[in-house]
Structure formats: C-alpha cells, structure tokens
Amino acid sequence: MMGSRTALSWTVFALLTLATQAVRSEIWTTNHFSTTSAAMSADGRVQVASGSGTLVSCDYGATWHSNAFTGATAVSAKGSNIIVASTPVVWISNDSGTNWASSPAPSPTFPARHIACSADASRMGMVLFGSHPIFISTNGGVAWTTNNDAPTASWTCISSSANGQRLVASIQNMGLWLSTNYGLNWYCILATNDLSGVACSADARTVVASGNNVVYLSSDSGTTWSLQHPYPFGGSGAACSADGTRLGVISYIGTFISANSGLTWTTESGGGTVLDAIATSADGHRWMIGHSGQGRLYLGTSTPDPAISVVPTNGNVMISWTVPSSPFVLQQVDGTSLNNSSWTAVTDLPTLNVNTLQNEIFIPTTNSDAFFRLSGP
C-alpha cells in the first residue's frame, strides 16, 4: 500500500511515489494441461492457455472452461477479447470466451506460432511456423494481410506495444526486427542468430529477447543493448511488465524473473522446466508458464506493490497507477488528519488507459490538502 500527498490545487507536492523493487519469490501452483501458448489480461484475471485444447479462466486461474480448438493465443488488456489462431480458422471471442466466432486463418495449412495484439485487440501481428512473411490484422483478427516489407523468414515470436504502433519480432537466424508504424515497415535492430522469444513494455521502450544462453535487454527501443546470462542452457520465451521493470524468461532448465529491469535474475524452482510458453500481467506479479510435452501449466503470483502518480492535468488532478493483478482501492484523507479511521474510498471508478495500461482517475482541484493511497492485500 503506497501513499502520496498533494494539495488539490496547482501546487503538487509529490508527483510520484516509487514502488519497492525488491525481489519477491513467486508462489506457484501446477495444473496438468499441455500448454504451448499462454496469454492473460492486464490485471491477470482472464487467463488463456492453449495446447491440447484451449482453457479460459475469468477468476485468476481458480476455475477453467475448455474448448476443443487449439493454437497461438492473445488477450486484450480488459480480457474481453480473446483470439486463438487455429488451422484453418482463427477463433475470436468478444465476451471472455463465452461465445466464439471463426474467420479464415492466414494459411490453411501452416499453424500460427505466435500472436501479439494491441491493448484493445483491434490490431494484431502473427507469425507462422515455417518460412513466411509477417501477417497483420487491423480489425481484431477477422482478416489478415502481408502488405508490409517484413522479410519472408522463419519468425519465432512477435510482441506489440499497448497502442499497437510498435511491433518487435524475432527471426531464429536473422535477429530482431522493429516496426514503428503498425507493422507496415520493418528494420533490424539486433543482429544475432539465436533468438527464440521477445517481449516489450507498454510503450515498447523496454525490449527483452531470449536467445541461446543469453538475454538481450534494451531500454531505448533497441538503439542500445546489454546482455545477461541468467541460465546456462537454451532459451524459449520472454515476458515483460507494462513499465519494463519486471521481466521473465524461460529456457530448457527453468523460469527466471527479474524485478529490476534485468539487472539481476531469480531462479523460480516452481516454474517448471523444458518450457514452451510464458505470459505475465501488466504489473508482472502474475505469471503463466507452459510445457507441452510434460503436460503442465504453472501459475505464479506475488504481492503487487503499485505506485501512484499524482499530476495536475487540465484543471484537475490525475491519479494513475499500473493496473494491479490484485484488487486495490484508491482512498483519500484530509491533509490535516492521517489517522487510519479517516480514510475513505474514492467513489469514482478508474478508467483503463489502453496506451499505458494504467488505471486513471481525474479529481477536480480544490484549495485543501489531501493524501491518497492504494489499499489492497
């Protein structure tokens, strides 16, 4: 629970309260389900695992319902839109998996290897097994096009910024490629021949790419890179929180999580081995890790510690925080009294900014001081 003090006028005493970045061990549970692709909503409430079928949970993985189709999967930030790229059709749900509609897949014979979507799921990128161009959809996966200059190659993974404008994609033997105009034009930002997975932050400034015994890290959209070696064998996937501080990579020998943008890594013994899929929530405190051959789906959780930002905006005060993966309530108290019994919930509900994956509340300015805090587990 974090607090921030501000005068509800044009003078703002605290613009940002920093979240604690200490490494916290994840608590893991194991499900017996063959998993080759995983995705979840920004808050981690809606989770989708695909492998020997498709499982959907709308309660943080507590209960699941299943469908027979399978394929690469993606989920919108709010969790209402789910896409599963099967062959020869793409399955689309707009109500968190209750109902499904199908559209023709980009290829009737080559299955999708990976899908990335914008936060509202209107824009998507898809790469297939085998040597193919990159496929782009601008209508939620209903139709796909290759009207771009991405090379025809053996693409391994693709990731998207929250607004869908920036896409990063990896080729096993041709490095990492970036598009800054919704997938129309592409150029190489990292020359290497061993990439298997890539992920980026909501603004795509932080990029993490998983290679053979190495993790490539960039904090400036691929202009400069650093290397880390958290595992001694292999690399098969990556995931990134919305702000780029919490990262995850998977390999043949296990799951590794960083809570400080990749400076140090923690081995997660409960996250399985010989892994095929990884996904995380916007705050990086919920994880899905999948294995196909052993038939396992690992779910990891740790306690979020969201930071609030308080900024004057157009005559109001905007209070924002990254969407947490556990329920938090914004509370306020008059600046003259900080006793716990005086805190009251802010009645306005936050809205999700799909460009930043942050909850936002706008409060009219007054001439009084106030404290704000997020109260949760």
Image (tube, rainbow, N blue to C red):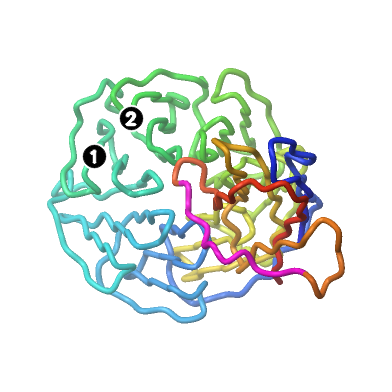
* Residue picked out by circle 2: 182
Label 2 crowd (10 A; few <14 / some 14-19 / many >=20): many
Dots 2, 1 in contact, CB < 8 A: yes
Q: Amino acid at mark 1?
A: Thr
How many numbered tags mark residues here?
2
Residue type for callout 2 = Tyr
Q: Residue 323, image x and y in percent?
A: 57, 55
Is residue 89 positioned above or below 340 on the image?
A: above
Residue 362, how many percent across, how many down? 55, 49
Note whether residue 255 is visible: yes
Tell me the quarter of the image containing the N terminus: bottom right
Residue at left 62%, top 19%?
Answer: 224
Residue wearing tag 1: 138
Furthest-front residue in view?
A: 367
Looking at the rendering, the stretch of residues picked out in magenta corresponds to 343-353
Q: In the drawing, what numbered circle is on residue 14?
A: none
